[in-house]
Amino acid sequence: MVNDEKVPLAREFINRLHKIDDPAAIVVTIHLFCENALNQLMKQKKKTPDKYITEQSAFLVKLDLCYNMGLLNEPMFNNLVKLNTLRNKCAHKVDVDFDKIDHNYWMGNVEDKIGSNEKSFKDNLVLIGVVTYGILHNHLAGIGIKL
């Protein structure tokens, strides 16, 4: 679904995740929405939003800029670096061993245990994505960035 119907972006994110079974597609979707948030952050906080480091720049370049401008905290920065590493594995390898991925993500105040035996790998991945994007989304809203 394209977001032409003005569905809030956070709702669109959840809707898309619920439709995906493939772990690699889940990772790419989480990354896509987080990168969109970084793009919006740069558009609204950079003095030269359309020059030098732009939407077309590499994810880590944009992430590093936002972090070093003090627009993201270190735990979120680390989550997004891990997410980018995982996304690159999914984008460049057809046989990613998802059993060996790092589940150690900062989860804010969420008490749920990532990697617990009661949850499937897909459930853990979706939880990581929802919490990471949710914290990022709420942080941006708190500094006046509307997604």
Image (cartoon, rainbow, N blue to C red):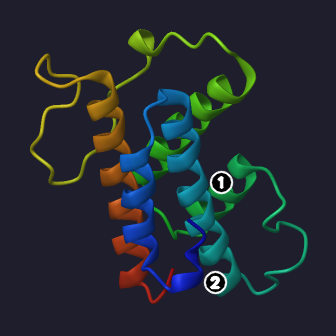
Q: Residue at x 44, y 18 (%)?
A: 101
Q: Residues within 10 Å of mark 2 (few under 14, many from 20)?
A: some
63, 24: nearer the viewer: 24
Q: Residue at x 67, y 15 (%)?
A: 94
**The N terminus sits in image quarter:** bottom right
Q: On the rendered structure, is 10 left or right of 66?
A: left
Q: Residue at x 70, y 59 (%)?
A: 62
The CA distance from mark 1 to mark 2 is 14 Å
Secondary structure type for disc 2:
helix
Q: Position of residue 16 (x, y in %)?
A: 45, 54
Position above or below: 86 against 52? above
Q: Position of residue 144 (x, y in %)?
A: 45, 90
- Are circles 1 and 2 on residues that touch, CB within 8 Å? no
Q: Residue furthest right?
A: 52
Q: Is residue 74 visible?
A: no
Position above or below: 83 against 95? below
Q: In the image, what residue type sits under mark 1?
A: Asp
Position above or below: 49 against 112? below
Q: In the image, what residue type sits under mark 2?
A: Lys
- The residue singled out by tag 2 in the image is 45
Q: Is residue 64 visible?
A: yes
Position above or below: 111 against 134? above
- The residue singled out by tag 1 in the image is 64
42, 119: nearer the viewer: 119
Q: Position of residue 24 (x, y in %)?
A: 55, 29
Image quadrant assignment for residue 36: bottom right
Q: Position of residue 27 (x, y in %)?
A: 52, 37
